Image: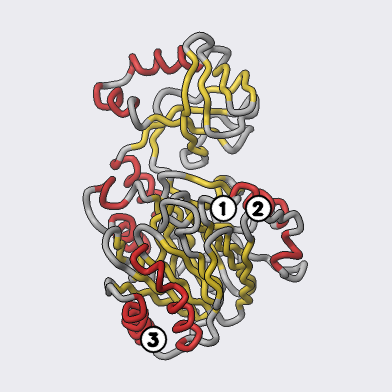
Amino acid sequence: MRWASTLSSGTDAAAAFVEAADALEAQLSSSAPDLLLVFASPHHAGGCEGISELAARRFPRALLVGCTASGVIGGAHEAEAGPALSLTAAVLPGVALSGFHVGPGVPGSDWRARVGLPPEARPSFLLLADPWTGDIGDLIQGLDRAYPGAPKFGGLASGGRRPLENRLLLGKAVHRGGTVGVAFSGDLSVDTLVAQGCRRIGRPMMVTRCEGTLLQELDWNPPLQVLAELYRSLDARDRELVQHSLFLGLEMRPEAVEHAPGELLVRNILGGDERSGAIAVGAELRPMTAAQFVLRDPHSAEEELRRMLASRRGAARRPAGALLFSCVGRGEGLFGTPDHDTSLFEEQLGPAPVGGFFCNGEIGPVAGTTFLHGYTSAFAIFRDPRDAGAGPAGGARR
């Protein structure tokens, strides 16, 4: 198995592709890739058809998949502004790839038939969706039902500000909506990591009354009352963060209230009702779920990602390659330095080809269930399953 990733800042789409492809072939030592990922800034949206044609001629064996994005990642660098095109390629002996496109509004009830894999396959899924037309919530729920436990990762394209502006690439086709995906099966180990960038405040509580997305009681008390008491206990810095960076974390292991960090699903607080003391949350709630308020800040985001990456070192060899799907709200705007997450990846796991893009929503699992996230960095880390400690083919280690 061999991965490579490159980045071009050329202003012409065709010339940028040729520049990146030349560097890619040099990294691969002229080995023909089986997979080619293309992530292009909005400057190159009009050139995506030409990129698809060039890719088919230059890499005829490779399955092409990609999308447009406000910022792209290639060669372990993050290009957040200006023209940019990243290419990430993989030589995957013993791995079967199945590409698919789901159009806007198309129901996907029979996912096994749609993906076209044999019953014994243990797949992993890359998903790239248009945020305006991708129906990504229904898609990932359907895939989770059809392939429980299979790693699913990716993000929402961020290269357009309105419908039809994004481009989704699959093979020789360029789509303006829906979702494109790739199912991997065979000799491949994929480890997923979702860093949500938050730290806990206060104590864990139980959801004792709720209706849909409305949280009515925490430990039998109105949530706004709980939050007011918590606010009074915080220092000045955290009180300021509460004004704009407060979220609710939901425990994904219902049998536990006290637990090690890392299994909370972080969701937005959408508003509150002063009369009843209830708050609206961006998730369907279930009674007796453990919950805890959390704050997001740059230091917490960095420390969480460092801890999660360090936990992936184990006895395995250095990753063959990785994909990073990072929120448009992270990057230099959050951390104040360029290449923050890719540099932290290299610091903890060693140099490896890393490609990806900045997303309008990130796809990845928490406690074995796939969710659409915000403000996160979601990694897919690829290893040969024969590497010591890499885990079973197609499996995710958590």
Residue 138 appears left or right of 382: right
Circle 3 sits in a helix, a strand or a loop, which is it? helix
Q: Secondary structure at mark 2?
A: loop
User: Which residue extends farthest bottom?
Assistant: 30
**Amino acid under disc 3:** Glu
Can residue 393 be seen here? The reply is no
Rendered residue at 40%/50% (across/down): 327
Q: Quadrant of residue 256?
A: top right
- Residue under label 3: 25
Residue 175 horizontal/vertical position (percent): 54, 66
**Type of the residue with mark 2:** Gly
**In this figure, which residue is indicated by the disc labeled 1?**
133
> Of marks 1 and 3, which one's residue comes earlier in the chain?
3
Q: Which residue is identified by label 2?
A: 105
Q: Nearer the viewer, mark 1 or mark 3?
A: 1
The answer to whether the residue labelled 1 contacts the one labelled 2, judged by CB atoms less than 8 Å apart, is yes
Q: Amino acid at mark 1?
A: Thr
Q: Residue at x 56, y 46 (%)?
A: 371
Q: Are marks 1 and 3 in contact (CB under 8 Å)?
A: no
Q: Is residue 233 visible?
A: yes
Reply above or below: 353 against 331: below
Q: Residue at x 35, y 83 (%)?
A: 18
Residue 350: x and y in percent read 34, 66
| 5 lies above or below 343 | below
